[in-house]
Image (cartoon, helix red, strand yellow):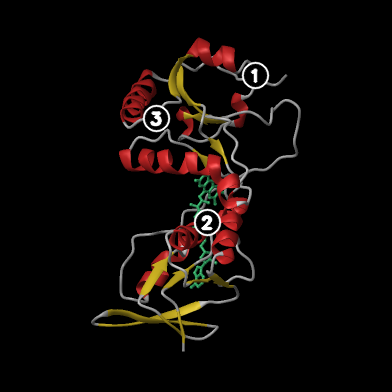
Amino acid sequence: MRTAEVVIIGGGIVGSSIAYHLTAAGCNDVLVMERESAQGKGSTGKSMGGVRAQFSTPVNIQMSLYSIPFYARFDDGLGYPCDYRAQGYLFCATSEQHMAYLKRNHETQVGLGLKDVRLLSADDIRNMFPQLRADDIVGGSFCSSDGFVDPYSAMNGFMSWACDHGAELWKNCVVTGIEYDSTGVVSVRSSRGAVATRIVVNCAGAWAASVAKMVNVELPVEPLRRMLVPTEPFDGFPHSAPMIIDMSNGFHFRPHLWKKS
Ligand SMILES: Cc1cc2nc3c(=O)[nH]c(=O)nc-3n(C[C@H](O)[C@H](O)[C@H](O)COP(=O)(O)OP(=O)(O)OC[C@H]3O[C@@H](n4cnc5c(N)ncnc54)[C@H](O)[C@@H]3O)c2cc1C
C-alpha cells in the first residue's frame, strides 16, 4: 500500500497552503487528494480574493498580520505570482453606532501592531474618493495594506512550490473513507486506492463536515452561499479602488455607493 506522512484532503487554497507550509517546514512526504480534475473548483475559484487585517477579533487580526506581509513577499519567496494588490479596504459607517464599533476595532488592531490602519472623518472619505456617494457617511476606517490577491494564483503557487519540493497532488481522487483504530488514523480510502498514513488534514472546505463524519466527528461547518456579480470593466469605476464596505448593508460591498459620473 502507498504510504504518506501526511494526507491532505482537498486541494483548494487551504489544502495548498498547508501543503506548502508542511513542505517548507521539512515534511517531504505530503500527499494532497483532490476529487476534481483541476484545483479551484470549490470556493477558492469563486473568491473575490479580498485580504484584510481590519477585523474585530484578535485571532483574525493576528492571522492577517502574518498572511498579508506573507502575500507581499509571495512572488519573490515562492517564485510564483499571487498578484497581491494593496488597494486598501474602506469601511464606511453610516451611524454613530457603526463608528463606535470601528473605533473599538481600530484600538484592538493598533494594539496588536497593525500600522497602516486609520480612522477617517466623512470629509476625509469624500476627499479621498470623490466618486463615492457619501452623503450618509459619518466616518470610516481605512487600511492601506488591505487589498486583494488572486486566489487562483495563490493556490496554484502554494501547490506548485510544494510539488517542486517533494509533495504530490492526486487529482480525480475522491476520499471515500478514513480507517482508524484506538491509536488514531491508519489509512485513507479513495477512488485511487488506499494510502497508509497516521496524519490526515481535513481541508475539504464546505464539505469538511462530511469528511469529519468519516471518523465520527461532528464538525459544525455548514455551507453558506455567497454572491458575486461580475461586470464588464467600465471607466466610472477605477480598477485601483479599495474594497468598500458599506456597514449599513450587512457589511457588504454596495456598488450604488459609487456616484454616476
Ligand atoms: C463568491 C465568494 C466570494 C468570496 N470572497 C472572499 C474574499 O473576498 N476573501 C476571502 O478571504 N474569502 C472569500 N471567500 C471565501 C473563500 O473563497 C473560502 O474561504 C476559501 O476559498 C476556502 O478554501 P478551502 O480550500 O477551504 O475550500 P475549497 O476551495 O472549496 O476547497 C475544498 C476542496 O476540497 C475538495 N473536496 C471536498 N470533499 C472531498 C473529498 N471527499 N475528496 C477529495 N476532495 C474533496 C473540493 O473538491 C475542493 O476543491 C469567498 C467565497 C465565495 C464563494
User: Is residue 251 found left or right of 239 in the rendered image?
Assistant: left
User: Which disc is residue 13 wearing?
Assistant: 2
Amino acid type of the residue tagged 2 in the rendering: Ile
| Closer to viewer: mark 2 or mark 1 | 2
Q: Is mark 2 within 8 Å of ligand 1?
A: yes
Q: Are marks 2 and 3 in contact (CB under 8 Å)?
A: no
Q: CA distance from mark 2 to mark 1?
A: 34 Å
Q: Is mark 1 within 8 Å of ligand 1?
A: no
Amino acid type of the residue tagged 1 in the rendering: Gln
Secondary structure category for the residue under label 1: loop
Residue drawn at x 35%, y 26% is 110
| Residue 87 visible from this viewpoint | yes
What x and y, as percent, mark residue 26?
43, 63
Q: CA distance from mark 3 to mark 1?
A: 28 Å
Q: Which residue has dot 1 on it?
A: 131
| Closer to viewer: mark 2 or mark 3 | 3
Secondary structure category for the residue under label 2: helix
Residue drawn at x 45%, y 63% is 203
Establish if 240 lies above or below 14: above
